Image (cartoon, rainbow, N blue to C red):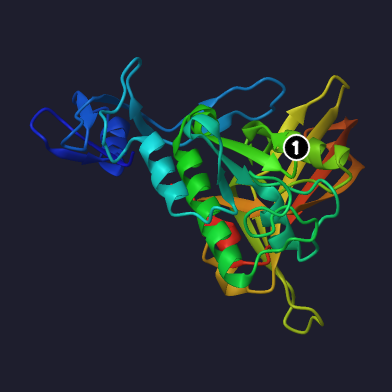
């Protein structure tokens, strides 16, 4: 939620609540902004959380959420369950399939095939009704057409934007099962927050780079473009890294996330400090070690272990601005 109201129905955008909080001004009791709901909500200011094995605290953006034990009224436009239903109802049934008891499955294999241009063999997705049912989803070489892939990208973007607004995977996981062929994928192995880049890298490393599409949330740190006279033009969008503690003295692990694309203007449109969501087929590099003298102690040597994750998006829909 990006806004809430008080008992007099005055609207409070999250930016106004942020300003009031920073000025130590009183924040009224807040209610859901949808007139048919008006359930109690709370403003949670931007803050940092310490996490296990993390050198730097995790930045948690400000948000407005339900108070403990409260639920949105039926039909409320801020009801995440309803928004999921609206998204999947408008989705291609080849991508979001129906399961028992009203649940759906999100078929990551066809997204992978569309993004890579190289259909995976084996592990083929068989739709309800068996191989060959529906529109050929049971074949091993299925690759979506342009219009279908546009639909898949739009659905994925909408669902990821919604997931980024939720406090956890629970709401989406209760409604949508992720599948990669016949394999079921946990949401925690698909959607990675800023403090879980190490888990994304380790997943790719374990899979030898041949993994299902992943989605990462990040904060833009910098941009780097090739020189004007370079033979190949490309730009990197670099994200704020994750640093992890180790049990080895004077050793620090870092996990770096970058996007590589030829369109510098497009990548530069995501400004430094802004939050983005990126999804697709990620590349990883094996960990590398470097040793440098400690900044404030010439007698110590620090070992830095660097892990890199890179996305080379095929379509611009694979990066979206987060809330």
**Residue closest to the far left:** 8
Q: Say which of 78 and 11 sits in front.
A: 78
Residue 189 percent across, percent down from the top left: 69, 35
Residue nearest the observer in this picture, 70 or 219: 70
**Residue 67, quarter of the rendered image:** top left
* Residue found at x 38% / y 30%: 45
Q: Which residue is mark 1?
A: 183
Q: Please name the residue shown 54% across and 52% down the image.
A: 93
Report the front residue among 175 and 64.
175
Q: Is residue 242 above or below residue 91?
A: above
Q: Is residue 96 above or below residue 118?
A: above
Q: Is residue 209 left or right of residue 276?
A: right
How many C-alpha atoms fall within 10 Å of the one at disc 1: few (<14), some, or many (≥20)? few
Up/down of 173 relative to 136, above or below: above
Q: Position of residue 161 (x, y in %)?
A: 48, 47
**Is 8 displayed left or right of 174 in the figure?**
left
Q: Position of residue 156 (x, y in %)?
A: 55, 51
Residue lying farthest to the top in this orientation: 69
Q: Residue at x 29, y 39 (%)?
A: 19
Asked whether residue 189 appears in the rendered view, the answer is yes
The residue that appears at 43% across and 41% down in the rendered structure is 84
In which quadrant is the N terminus drawn? top left
Percent across and percent down for residue 242 are 69, 37
Do we see residue 26 in this rendering? no
Which structural element holds mark 1? Answer: strand
């Amino acid at each position: 939620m990006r806004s809430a109201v008080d008992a007099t129905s005055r609207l409070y955008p999250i930016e106004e609540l942020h300003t009031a909080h920073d000025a130590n001004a009183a924040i009224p009791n807040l209610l859901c902004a949808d007139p048919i709901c008006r359930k109690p909500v709370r403003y949670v200011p931007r803050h940092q959380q310490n996490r296990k094995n993390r050198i730097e605290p995790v930045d948690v953006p400000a948000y407005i959420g339900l108070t403990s034990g409260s639920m949105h009224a039926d039909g409320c436009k801020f009801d995440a369950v309803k928004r999921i239903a609206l998204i999947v109802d408008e989705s291609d049934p080849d991508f979001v399939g129906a399961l028992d008891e009203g649940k759906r499955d999100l078929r990551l294999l066809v997204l992978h095939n569309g993004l890579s241009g190289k259909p995976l063999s084996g592990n083929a997705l068989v739709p309800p009704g068996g191989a060959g049912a529906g529109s050929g989803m049971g074949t091993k070489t299925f690759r979506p057409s342009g219009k279908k892939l546009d639909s898949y990208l739009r659905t994925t973007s909408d669902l990821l934007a919604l997931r980024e607004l939720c406090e956890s995977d629970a709401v989406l996981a209760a409604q949508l099962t992720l599948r990669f062929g016949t394999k079921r994928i946990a949401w925690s192995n698909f959607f990675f927050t800023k403090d879980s880049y190490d888990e994304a890298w380790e997943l790719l490393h374990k899979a030898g780079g041949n993994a299902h599409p992943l989605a990462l949330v990040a904060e833009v740190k910098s941009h780097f473009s090739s020189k004007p006279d370079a033979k190949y033009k490309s730009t990197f969008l670099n994200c704020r890294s994750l640093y992890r503690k180790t049990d080895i003295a004077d050793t620090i692990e870092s996990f770096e996330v970058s996007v590589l694309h030829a369109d510098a203007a497009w990548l530069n449109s995501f400004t430094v400090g802004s939050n983005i969501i990126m999804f697709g087929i990620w590349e990883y590099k094996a960990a590398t070690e470097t040793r440098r003298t400690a900044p404030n102690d010439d007698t110590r040597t620090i070992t830095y272990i660097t892990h890199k994750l890179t996305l080379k998006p095929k379509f611009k829909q694979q990066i979206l601005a987060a809330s």
